[in-house]
Image (spheres, rainbow, N blue to C red):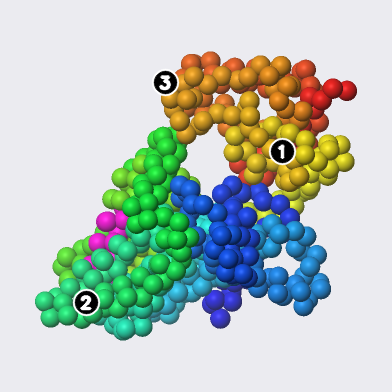
Amino acid sequence: MLFFVFLVLAFRLRQEDLEFVVEPDFSWKLIDIWKNFFSTFDISLLPQTAPYVYLDGQFIAYSAFDGLLRLASSHIVALRSYFPNDLSYALGAALLANILAYAAACTIFYAAMYRLTGYISISVLMAIGLFLAPQMVEINMGRVDFLVTFPLMVIFYCSCVLAIGQERKRHAVVLGLALAFAATIKLNGLFLGVFPAIAALAAFRFTTIKRLVFFAAIGFASFLPAFLLLMLRYFYQLTPLGIMQHYKDSVAQVSAWSSLTVGASPLYYNIDLMMGHGTAFIVLYLACAAATLVIAIVHRSRPAIFLALLFVVLSVAAAAASLKYQRGGYHLLPVFFAVVGFGAARLLSSSAHRLVKIAAIAVGGFAFASGIFYSSGIYAAAVAKRKSEIIGIQLLKREPRDWLRSHVPPGTTICTQTDSSWTLPPLDGFHVTDGPLAIAYLDPAALATSAPPGLEEVRMKCPIVMTSDSHRNFYRNIFNLITKRAPADSAAKWDAFFAELNERYPPTVFRSPVALRVKVKEIYLNDLRDK
């Protein structure tokens, strides 16, 4: 029952117009390629690997749902209107997979909490709190972060049963499969192995060594074939040393991104990102974490040791992370809610005076309720944003796409800013290049000598220039961020270039009262062709 409630709530967070992508990092063509691969098993269809933070696990999973949607629409005529192109099937597949994954993840978290506490009411409340977590519901449902929550919660559940000594062979098998899936979705997926490692440490006794080794062996035996299968493209195209180099290059790419982010507090994931829950909830979960630590030390309770160690290790790792961003840190959420639920359960089962219990429950209940109140408001705002997004898609994606089709011949060169395609309408059928507008924003040395082109150079190479207000601001922000390594007036030069471009070649401007991702509200189309 709880799963279906979460399913309905997650469905309301979907993107309703599937014809266009509004998020970066959505490689729909890879989903389509994997779908075609599974239709033919022609391995030559798979593209060459390149350094990237995302691996093939997500594309394989999404391709399966892509195939299911195509099969369903081939039998149900009414569905076809929702899927006008290949991109819409890929996006619909990602949304469907992510919705199911998130609903299942929160249901599995309920099961884990019941294992830890034995209270249905507490477990339900913690699962609801997790589902409504502001840092999750504010993420677009099309992003892979929701898919990650599924193996994350499976790993958390299996780690819980391991920590309290209730593990079975099936838990080891499922744990291995979940770790393999997580490890092949994102580059840092293997990091989730810290959950069962800490659980094993909490459960460790000299008398349990044989049992723990047996559990680990079964887990590894299920992990390895699943990992090899999901990493098929990498093992086919690269040698073992080549795979290691791939990971090294991908980590270097992530490190380059971290150099472009504004420094955040070491407690960003523990405090700053949790502010959406309200200050009272932050105080509550920190107090419960401290109480769990005390219980672990004084009573040597296995679940308390597991949760306390997990809280400390993950918090230290999060503080040390060089790249802190809004969509990060959600692996901490089950731990935060788990310590709250565990603390409440221990209070209810303690021998404390009745009045003390009532007072503690009243204070803690108020703090938790306030967190749910704030989270519910953010959830409602996210649902409203998804609905209003239809307006932005129509005005910033569909209308400029249709204008191009009617005013610009196919094959015409269209110049855009570097990596800005996701902020623009689809440019299929045209020759798209960043050409003279290119900047190597991940290369500080190259940025230090970067300067905007002259208009004559642009006119010779670019019959059409298409940009967005968001990406023009991105260029400005990049140069303002690296003023120590680039000329102080670099941002001003690019602003002057775009101003001169608009003055010499007045743009056709497409505006929307509703912003799309990262505040895209305007699309500029400068026509430099001879009249």
For label 2, the crowd category at 10 Å Cα-Cα, with few meaning under 14, some 14 to 19 and many 20 or more, is some
Sequence-wise first label, 1 or 2: 2
- What's the residue type where badge 1 is placed? His
- What's the residue type where badge 3 is placed? Lys
- Residue 212: mark in rendering: 2
Whole-Å distance between the Cαs marked 3 and 2? 53 Å
Residue 485 higher or lower than 108, as above or below: above
Residue 312 among those drawn in magenta: yes
- The answer to whether the residues at label 3 and label 2 have Cβ atoms under 8 Å apart is no
- Residue 431: mark in rendering: 1
Q: Is residue 132 left or right of residue 178?
A: right
Residue 442 higher or lower than 311, as above or below: above
Q: Secondary structure at mark 3?
A: loop
> Can residue 392 be seen in the rendering of this structure?
no
Sequence-wise first label, 3 or 2: 2
Residue with the mark numbered 3: 484
Of residues 333 and 17, the one drawn nearer to the viewer in this rendering: 17
Residue 478 higher or lower than 492, as above or below: below
Residue 301 higher or lower than 445, as above or below: below
Of residues 61 and 530, the one drawn nearer to the viewer in this rendering: 530
Of residues 114 and 170, the one drawn nearer to the viewer in this rendering: 170
